Amino acid sequence: MRLLAALFSLALVPAAQAAVERVEITSRTPLANGQAFGQAGAYERITGRLHYAVDPSNDANLPIVDLALAPRDARGKVRFAGDFTLIRPIQGARANGRLLYEVNNRGNYWLFNLFQNGPFTNDLADPASIGDGWLLEQGYSLLWTGWNWDVVPGGNRQGIDLPVARQRGGAPIQGKVVNEIFLNAPAKAAPHRGILAKGYPFAPGARETAELTVRNTPTGTRTVIPRSQWQLARLDGDKVVPDDGSVYLETGLLPGRIYELSYTAQDPVVVGLGLASIRDAISFFRHEPRDAAGQRNPLLDQGGKLPTATLAFGISQSGRVIQSMLLQGLHVDEQRRPTFDGAFVHVAGAGKGGFNYRWAQTTRHFSHFEESTYPTDYFPFTTVPQTDDVSGARGSVLDRARASGVVPKLIYTSSSTDYWVRAASLLHTDTAGRQDLPLAPNARAYLLSGAQHVIATPPARGVYENCLSPTDYRPQLRALLAALDGWVAQGTTPPDSRIPTIADGSLVGLDAYLAALDGLPAALRRPTDYLRPPRLDLGPRFASEGIPEVQPPVFGARYGALVPQVGADGNELAGLKTPQVAVPLGAYLGWNLRTDAAGAPQGLARLFGSFVPRAAGDLPARQAYVQQVERVAREQVQQGVLLARDVAAVVRQAGAFHDRVAALAPGQRDCGYLAAAK
């Protein structure tokens, strides 16, 4: 109630200087060697640092855990700085008036890969990174900023330097941290700090008292490994080198086992300032003509104007960031102004994440088998009010947005894999998985049928039982971004949601799903479970103050997640299907299993689905297949879920894919034919 009341009191706060006080530009270069992109013309890439000054006394910042314990300047502000990249039409008057902000994923850029068919790269100086230039042809200005404190530097990743919280008397803060290690192959040493993460430093004396445990499953019993058997070290060739970020075990770390390093850490970062930095960066470029030093907002150069609308996009981790900002009301700035008018939340499941509590590790998240002790999927989940069937709590992700009067338009896309390992069904059901819940009028949701979390088709199975799903849903993403833009800018209604439901039998539990798989080969190993997120007990101060006192947390009752039902051919009944999935040459499954050699063979792949091709004798004739794909593609153009410009490429790729599937030898296990499908 205190937080909710604080949001209402924002109306009483006098206008203040923007939280971005200074824009430091370090480079300004033509994009793609000055290439022109449609009517928008040539673009430039501007990079530098944003210098923030956040006011702890402003109620907009009340949700930020430990902000009161951050160091302040003489004016009582908390200062920090982070990277930014802005791409804009050089002739500002040619911009379309919309700023598209991507919440970077672990410091990485995804927009050009997902919306311009470019390679996945952080080297935006390389003209090849631009892809086909679709976003640029539309006239968007594009913005990225550092927000994630624990991203390791390098690789052109976006970073930020956030302050450390200290006790009110100035003494350092200490607390227990748990770091999981999970491997796909045997090793004597492995990092323990997460994906591209810095981690928290050891408190004095904590290296000697740290504890390493191992267990076979997320709910299994932990066995303590004697301290004499392991070290904080890495291998440099055959040499054991001391390293606080790595664990060395002489007898070896086994694949598929869950190792945990527990230790007393020191100097917690004020992690929630990362969310505030996103809010304040967007707010500056949207609302402010210049910074406090008089530096003009670069969007105003050469006839440019402040944006008329702002869109935010996040993939996976960064989509969960957007959800977290909405849940905590951190999408409204210190002057009670909106930051983004619309948000595209892609493959985030129903999750939020470790973005605003003490000792939060932003890169970690629930999966079916890995990292099940890091708060990710927690109540509330839906865009309309719901009741937790265990605690009786009531709420929605948008409660604070509604209280502030700033409710953005939302589009959610979830792959099939996100229903299996990211509990995406909780976006649109009750917490028990017994009944459907509607989406709010300002939200749409789409299951990308038969698709996996990331678009990837390596030529080998690697640590997984099956070849990966080749579904490329990027043409659908482009159409849905265009729909979000039209919804925000012109009020054009987007396509209706396409999600599985309990009511029509297209959203089910495991038993019903397995019964429907009878048409697939008996040799295909079936899943025995999927992610049904546990409620985590991290102690009484966690919910009220964001301070975990029980580490590792205690597992409670699981939420009732469900998975999409399939037909006799193994393909899902509901959702938004790419033309190739709508006219299938095999079964596009949302799950894949680990191999025995990789360990934890009952565990589901975190990111990947499966493709089980039909036998060559069961395939439709090529011409008939291509005609069907083209018919579906043209129907999707009319439905607003595919752009007319993408039809020819979709049809061409489908024909080539048919050729490769038809050429498969009986029993062939190589997956190279899928890698060639793009």
Image (cartoon, helix red, strand yellow):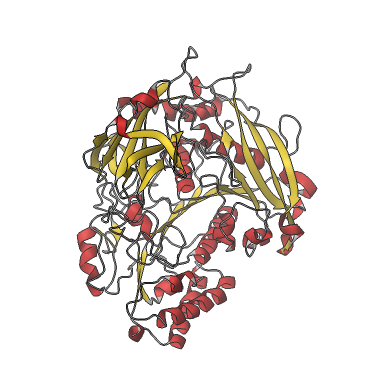
Q: Quadrant of residue 508?
A: bottom left
Residue 188: % across, % down: 37, 43
Count the labels in the image: 0
Whether residue 657 is situated above or below residue 122 in the rendered picture: below
Residue 224: % across, % down: 25, 34
Using the rendered image of the protein, determine whether residue 151 is visible from the camera's viewpoint: yes
Q: Which of 462 and 428 is in front in this view?
A: 462
Q: Nearer the viewer, residue 104 or 525?
A: 525
The residue sitting at the top extreme is 169
Residue 165: % across, % down: 49, 23
Whether residue 275 is situated above or below residue 92 in the rendered picture: above
Q: Nearer the viewer, residue 388 or 625?
A: 625
The residue sitting at the right extreme is 302
Q: Which residue is drawn at 34% across and 24% down?
A: 209
Whether residue 19 is situated above or below residue 70 in the rendered picture: below
Q: Is residue 671 left or right of residue 480?
A: left
Using the rendered image of the protein, determine whether residue 374 is visible from the camera's viewpoint: no
Q: Which residue is drawn at 44% across and 86% down?
A: 622
Q: In which quarter of the image is residue 537?
A: top left
Residue 219: % across, % down: 23, 42
Q: In this view, does 78 lie to the left or right of 299?
A: left
Quadrant where the N terminus sits is: top left
Q: Which residue is drawn at 57% across and 63% down?
A: 117
